[in-house]
Image: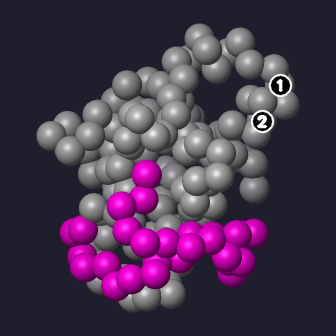
Amino acid sequence: MYLTKVSVRESKISGKGVFSLEDIKKDSIVWKFEPTHDKSLSIEEFDKLDDVSKTNLLRVAYLSSITNRWIYPPDGDSALFTNHSEANNLSVVFDKSISEEPVFKANRDIKVGEELTVNYLEFDNRPKDKVLDFE
């Protein structure tokens, strides 16, 4: 769940992206897993899904290296449009005092209007050659 004000619009990276509606200071927590908002599935639950559902989920979910569960935003959530970039401005932090799942902090000051990006390879526990294979 994004903890800062964001909007979704066309991205230069891919399709739509998430853009900051406010300045964000370096080290601010920008996104965290919120169990009453975000979704999660066990590997067994994921395996029972039909192929279309699995394919759709693989585009927006990550396999948590902490809980070994599939984590993903609910329908309509702006996090569905968070794009990957190796020049990401949000970095993963593992801090159980904040969340049972990884949280994302600004790794530099971010200005209003900048696209918020993460490096999927930092936190997705799928084999590295499978994390980006949907592109």
Mark-to-mark CA distance, 2 and 1:
6 Å
Residue 20 at x, y percent in the picture:
46, 78
Which quadrant, please, contains the C terminus?
Answer: bottom right
Residue 87 visible, this orientation:
no
Q: Which residues are magenta?
A: 1-28
Identify the main secondary structure in magenta: loop
For residue 5, side relative to residue 39 (left or right)? left
**Is residue 23 in the magenta section?**
yes
Task: Look at label 1 and name its amino acid.
Answer: Asp
Residue 106 visible, this orientation:
yes
Q: Which residue is mark 2?
A: 55
For residue 126, side relative to residue 24 (left or right)? right
* Viewer-proximal residue among 115 and 35: 35
Q: Secondary structure at mark 2?
A: helix
Residue 128 at x, y percent in the picture:
56, 42
- Residue 110 vertical placement versus 46 (above, below): below
Task: Look at label 2 and name its amino acid.
Answer: Thr
Residue 45 at x, y percent in the picture:
61, 14
Quarter location, residue 55:
top right
Q: Which residue is mark 1?
A: 51
User: How many dots with numbers?
Assistant: 2
* Viewer-proximal residue among 88 and 42: 42
Whether label 2 touches label 1, CB < 8 Å: yes
Q: Who's the residue at 43% across and 72% down the image? A: 5
Tag of residue 113 = none
For residue 58, side relative to residue 123 (left or right)? right
